[in-house]
Image: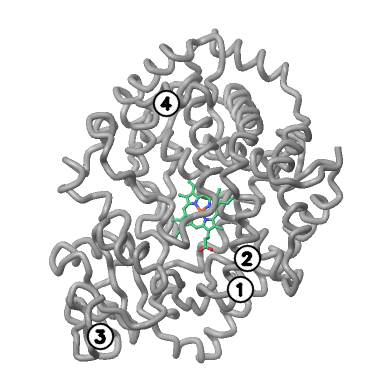
């Protein structure tokens, strides 16, 4: 580590105005594009000011690795987000500083988000994929995004609460979708202003609005997840939330526990479906690439059965297509911000304690020195050079997404099944760029995607599998429970 000195300059960046800093240079949408410009101009570690706070933008994979992995003791905490951490999402583990409370809650979550259970979840994911195909086949002109959200809903309401496969209706998942969208307002650009000018919190009207929003959201979470949790505890089958409530650490009150449940619900129900929406949009926009994915699936799987997890290693082009989607359009383009827990000195610059650290994932994925023609959708690049660094879509270091194993499992089988069963055609005007960026999440719009069944043979398999399906998942859930070493009630 370089010698500490307070005269060491901050990383370079655009000239800041007194008081407001660089606020006027911040675009209202896609700020990660401006961050990239600054990284290109000032270097891979650049800084700017928003109000009184220092923001450090990291524009290269090597720098993110140095700081988030090698200096994890300094870079694993979160910034203090006034609106989100103290009002609307108070108690959500993802927003907590890196301290004993966070460690205890994180340990609790990883009790069930444990990679050891992955193979035991295969039957549940596969069954949900079958339901997805059956529902879509019967509603080809329907709302594609709805179906993709229902897929995630089926998987997670079975895993989290032990419900029968497919028992969650489209209406249930619409309600959940509305709930999931609400908190994203807490991280909108507008709210950042309050975060950057903490004095605004003292303005009575602002404080009252934050309080109202917080109370409303907490009320919603308590009602929704509180009653679902009650049902999970009574459920005969093993389920994740019953398991978690049995492992609940001493000192964690009902409200705190419910925020753990809320966090897992929000994460599970938003991220996966959005990745699937992106997959469908990219399939429609790049028919020639999708054709290659389907040729591969036809060779390996054929049309008389569904793709399975055993097929995964034989479908490298599908994997390349998925990875290229994630590189070009990362779900969380600037990734999630971190903060420094103390002063640090890096590359000759001072990174002050409490600085907000933004690992600009989108810029890293656009690095032309790593990815030739980075703006082009070229799945083949992953086969030509298997040593290419995979986009860090799940974050880094100690705060890396604990749900990544489950997420990858669900994405693979859903994407393989969708590509096996359907063609995705482009309606006039479809563009991935129109994908709405709701706060910091990229939300691809699927209205411009037309879905067609690939053949009558595929349709017959979907129907046959649906008719043979047993929606009772309790044996599979018991298997997950036994991997985790719990007694089960069946
Ligand atoms: C495609 C799917 C997903 C993506 C792209 C994704 C991405 C991310 C990212 C970028 C972070 C921040 C990591 C960091 O700060 O470095 C994160 C955190 C988190 N994710 Fe995910 N995630 C996904 C699915 C899931 C699922 C399915 C779950 C749970 C069932 C989950 C649970 C969490 C939790 C609890 C955190 C907070 C970690 C903390 O306490 O700081 N995620 N995720």
- Reading the chain from its start, which is encountered first: label 3 or label 1? 3
Q: Are marks 3 and 1 in contact (CB under 8 Å)?
A: no
What is the CA distance from the residue labelled 2 to the residue labelled 3? 34 Å
Q: What SS does tag 4 mark?
A: strand
Q: Please name the residue shown 23% across and 89% down the image.
A: 5
Q: Which residue is mark 3?
A: 4
Circles 2 and 1, Cβ within 8 Å, touching? The answer is yes
Q: Are marks 4 and 2 in contact (CB under 8 Å)?
A: no
Mark 4, mark 3: which one is toward the viewer? 3
Q: Secondary structure at mark 3?
A: loop
Which residue is under mark 1? 101
The CA span between labels 2 and 1 is 6 Å
| Mark 4 or mark 3, earlier in chain | 3
Circle 1 SS class: helix
Which residue is identified by label 4?
A: 424
Q: Which residue: 78% across, 31% down?
A: 472
Residue drawn at the location 76% of the way across and 36% of the way down:
164
Q: Is mark 2 within 8 Å of ligand 1?
A: yes
Image position of 132 (left or right of 188): right
Residue 19, numbered label: none
Instruction: Give the left or right position of residue 303, taking residue 364 as reference.
Output: right
- The tag earlier along the polypeptide, 2 or 3, is 3
| Up/down of 259 relative to 333, above or below | below
Give the spatial CA distance, label 4 vs label 1.
46 Å
Say which of marks 4 and 1 sits in front. 1
Question: Residue 477 in the image: x percent, y percent?
Answer: 73, 38
Q: Which mark is residue 105?
A: 2
Question: The C terminus is located in which quarter?
Answer: top right
Residue 121 image position (x, y, % from top left): 63, 36
């Amino acid at each position: 580590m370089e010698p500490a000195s307070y005269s060491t300059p901050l990383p370079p960046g655009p000239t800041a105005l007194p008081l407001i800093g660089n606020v006027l240079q911040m675009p209202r949408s896609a700020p990660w594009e401006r961050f990239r410009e600054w990284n290109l101009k000032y270097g891979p570690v650049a800084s700017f000011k928003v109000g009184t706070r220092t923001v450090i933008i990291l524009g290269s994979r090597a720098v993110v690795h140095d700081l988030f992995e090698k200096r994890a003791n300094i870079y694993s905490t979160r910034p203090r987000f006034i609106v989100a951490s103290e009002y609307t999402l108070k108690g959500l583990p993802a927003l907590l500083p890196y301290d004993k409370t966070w460690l205890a809650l994180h340990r609790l979550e990883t009790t069930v988000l444990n990679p050891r259970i992955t193979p035991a979840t295969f039957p549940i994911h596969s069954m949900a994929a079958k339901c997805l195909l059956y529902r879509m086949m019967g509603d080809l002109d329907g709302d594609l995004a709805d179906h993709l959200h229902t897929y995630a809903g089926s998987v997670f309401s079975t895993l989290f609460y032990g419900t029968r496969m497919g028992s969650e209706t489209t209406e249930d998942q619409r309600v959940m979708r509305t709930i999931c969208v609400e908190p994203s307002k807490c991280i909108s650009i507008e709210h950042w202003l309050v975060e950057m000018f903490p004095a605004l919190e003292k303005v009575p009207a602002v404080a009252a609005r934050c309080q109202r929003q917080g109370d409303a959201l907490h009320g919603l979470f308590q009602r929704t997840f509180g009653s679902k949790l009650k049902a999970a505890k009574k459920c005969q089958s093993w389920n994740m939330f019953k398991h978690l409530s049995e492992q609940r650490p001493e000192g964690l009150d009902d409200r705190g526990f419910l925020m753990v449940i809320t966090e897992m619900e929000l994460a599970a129900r938003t991220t996966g479906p959005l990745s699937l929406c992106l997959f469908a949009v990219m399939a429609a926009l790049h028919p020639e690439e999708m054709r290659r994915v389907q040729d591969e699936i036809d060779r390996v799987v054929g049309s008389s059965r569904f793709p399975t997890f055993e097929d995964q290693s034989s479908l490298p082009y599908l994997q390349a297509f998925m990875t290229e989607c994630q590189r070009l359009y990362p779900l969380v383009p600037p990734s999630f911000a971190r903060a420094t827990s103390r002063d640090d000195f890096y590359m000759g610059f001072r990174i002050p304690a409490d600085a907000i650290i933004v690992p600009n994932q989108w810029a890293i994925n656009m690095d032309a020195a790593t990815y030739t023609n980075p703006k082009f959708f070229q799945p083949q690049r992953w086969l030509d050079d298997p040593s290419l660094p995979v986009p860090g879509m799940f974050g880094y270091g100690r705060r890396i997404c604990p749900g990544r194993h489950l997420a990858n499992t669900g994405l693979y089988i859903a994407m393989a099944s969708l590509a096996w069963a359907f063609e995705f055609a482009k309606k006039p005007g479809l563009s991935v760029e129109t994908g709405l960026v709701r706060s910091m999440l990229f939300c691809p719009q699927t209205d411009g995607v037309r879905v067609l069944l690939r053949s009558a043979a595929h349709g017959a398999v979907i129907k046959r599998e649906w008719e043979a399906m047993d929606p009772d998942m309790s044996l599979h859930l018991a298997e997950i429970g036994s991997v985790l070493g719990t007694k089960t009630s069946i």
